[in-house]
Amino acid sequence: KSTLDPDFEELRLIYSQSAFSPDGKTLAFTAQRNGRDVLYLMDVQRRKITHTFDKFALDVVMNPSFSPDGKQVVISGYNSGVFDLFIVNVADATLRQLTNDKHAEMMPQWSPDGKTIAFATDHGEGTDLDVLRFAKWKIGTLDLTANRVEVLPNQDGLNLNPMWAPDGKSLAFLSDRNGTSNIFL
């Protein structure tokens, strides 16, 4: 069977990751359809789209990650060029904005306990939006209970793609702090 499907377009400068649901039965991914970003949920075994979320008032939708219970998906999205984090409720297709600032929040990953979202960001020391100076990206976390963003300490270089350990006590991420991209914990 051909891998080409005219319903899914993916032409981006920045890539968007896909994500499996906690039970491994559903794949969340984004693509463009008719020039608009769409979040899709696909039943992996049947290879059928089960949900199409295309009514969001966002210019870009990227990097889905399921909540531990599989009932919600966190995404990076933006309007007017500023990436923020949003939660999509799978059952009723509602969208809730989590962050709303001038900094970018991308590549979100939900913690195993469902209380925190890790992400890559330009928050932190070295970024001065008044003069458009941006520090290299760092890993940040959003405490969903306190609605508080924290940039993790001791991050040199460019830091991307955070992934939680299964016990939720540590994060693995890519960093070029020693001159070459490697995985750090």
Image (cartoon, rainbow, N blue to C red):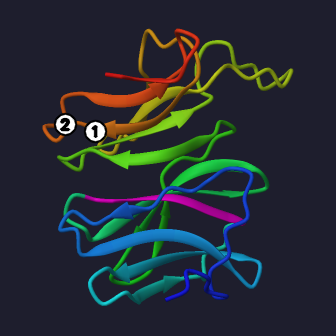
Horizontal and vertical percent position of residue 70? 25, 68
Quarter of the view holding residue 24? bottom left
User: Can residue 149 be seen in this snapshot?
Assistant: no
Classify the position of the C terminus by image quarter: top left
- The amino acid on which the numbered mark 2 sits, given as a three-letter code, is Gly
**What residue appears at the point 26 percent right and 84 percent down from the top-left corner?**
45
Dot 2: element: loop
Answer whether residue 74 is magenta in the image. Answer: no
User: Mark on residue 168?
Assistant: 2
Q: Image check: 132 left or right of 109?
A: right
- The amino acid on which the numbered mark 1 sits, given as a three-letter code, is Trp
* 108, above or below 132, in the image: below
Kindly indicate whether the residue at mark 1 contacts the one at mark 2 (C-beta within 8 angstroms). yes
Horizontal and vertical percent position of residue 59? 72, 66
Report the span colored magenta.
Answer: 59-67
The residue sitting at the left extreme is: 167
Principal secondary structure, stretch drawn in magenta: strand
Quarter of the view holding residue 157? top right
Q: Residues within 10 Å of mark 1 (few under 14, many from 20)?
A: some
* 127, above or below 77, in the image: above
Dot 1: element: strand
Q: Image check: 53 left or right of 77?
A: left
Residue named by callout 1:
164
Horizontal and vertical percent position of residue 162? 40, 36
Q: Residues within 10 Å of mark 2 (few under 14, many from 20)?
A: some
